[in-house]
Image: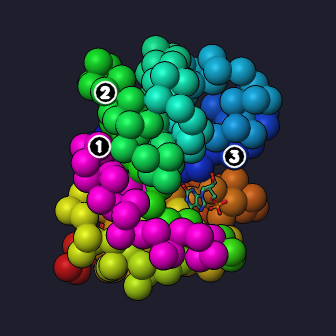
């Protein structure tokens, strides 16, 4: 994924045509599109190939299975044209390594989830944060997912692991793009604030411009 905009579009829609049209229209403002179960279960895995003709695709299946299944799912995603997969770190080093090993066969990337943005995630994930970063390091991941609505956590994670940080939780979940970037995020992930907006293209451009301005002022 080439960093030009710092923005990743979370395409959590259910309609194929709408997703492709919108992704095409905002492609100048994003560096990748992230697909999750709502889209893939509604439209089929071919959507990964279709989107990969427009931009890089991150397959966010939050893989959390035994190693050979994690590996099989990753392989399908990469074969369809994904550039990266997202995996949970809590299943341990072997499960995560099964993803990074598979990714290396495709020149793909793996991002591990070390913390989450929603209320209640702190119940289990906060106390495990150091361990989840350690597991991610050992598995040689390409980056981590860290909550964009909690800049203090981004800073904490940045201090524990020297890697790319992708941050969801911006907009609808209360996070601010500039704050996340200034805390150490390399990319922000935004869904509803784009696709639910009355003018999604304008919103995507505005979100991108906001963080772009910040980069140039750094
Ligand atoms: P919006 O902008 O609609 O985007 O809130 C939600 C998208 O981001 C994903 N998401 C997360 N993924 N850890 C993750 O791995 C998180 O803490 C997190 N918070 C949101 C969510 O799956 C959706 O695609």
Which residue is nearer to you in this view: 197 or 114?
Answer: 114
Snapshot quadrant of residue 24: top right
Residue 72 x %, y %: 51, 19
Is ligand 1 less than 8 Å from the beta carbon at label 3? Answer: yes
Q: Residues within 10 Å of mark 2 (few under 14, many from 20)?
A: some
Residue 23 visible in this rendered orientation of the protein: no
In this figure, which residue is indicated by the disc labeled 2? 101
For image coordinates 46% across by 69% down, the residue present is 128
Which residue is nearer to you in this view: 180 or 64?
Answer: 64
Query: For the residues carrying marks 2 and 3, which lies nearer the camera in this image?
Result: 2
* Residue 34 counted in the magenta span: no
Magenta span dominant secondary structure: helix
Residue 176 x %, y %: 51, 79
Which residue is nearer to you in this view: 180 or 197?
Answer: 180
For image coordinates 31% across by 27% down, the residue present is 101
**Ligand 1 image-quadrant field:** bottom right
Q: Residues within 10 Å of mark 3 (few under 14, many from 20)?
A: some
Instruction: Tell whether 139 sits left or right of 126.
Output: left
Residue 215 x %, y %: 26, 71
For image coordinates 49% across by 53% down, the residue present is 90
Which sits earlier in the primary sequence, circle 1 or circle 3? 3
Which sits earlier in the primary sequence, circle 2 or circle 3? 3
Look at the image and give the residue range highlighted in magenta.
121-145
In this figure, which residue is indicated by the disc labeled 3? 12
**Badge count:** 3
In this figure, which residue is indicated by the disc labeled 1? 139
């Amino acid at each position: 994924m080439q960093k030009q905009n710092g923005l990743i579009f979370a395409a959590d829609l259910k309609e194929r045509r709408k997703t492709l049209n919108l992704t095409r229209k905002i492609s100048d403002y994003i560096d990748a599109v992230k697909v999750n179960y709502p889209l893939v279960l509604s439209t089929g895995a071919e959507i990964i190939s279709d989107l990969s003709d427009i931009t890089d695709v991150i397959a966010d299946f939050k893989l959390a299975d035994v190693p050979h299944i994690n590996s099989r799912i990753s392989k399908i995603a990469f074969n369809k044209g994904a550039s990266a997969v997202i995996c949970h770190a809590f299943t341990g080093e072997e499960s995560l390594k099964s993803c990074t090993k598979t990714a290396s066969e495709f020149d793909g990337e793996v991002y591990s989830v070390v913390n989450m943005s929603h209320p209640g995630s702190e119940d289990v994930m906060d106390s495990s944060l150091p361990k989840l970063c350690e597991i991610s390091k050992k598995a040689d991941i390409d980056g981590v997912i860290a909550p964009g609505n909690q800049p203090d956590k981004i800073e904490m994670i940045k201090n524990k692991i020297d890697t790319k940080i992708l941050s969801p939780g911006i907009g609808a979940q209360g996070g601010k793009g500039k704050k996340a970037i200034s805390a150490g995020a390399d990319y922000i992930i935004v869904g509803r604030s784009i696709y639910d907006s009355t003018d999604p293209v304008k919103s995507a451009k505005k979100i991108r411009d906001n963080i772009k301005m910040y980069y140039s002022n750094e």
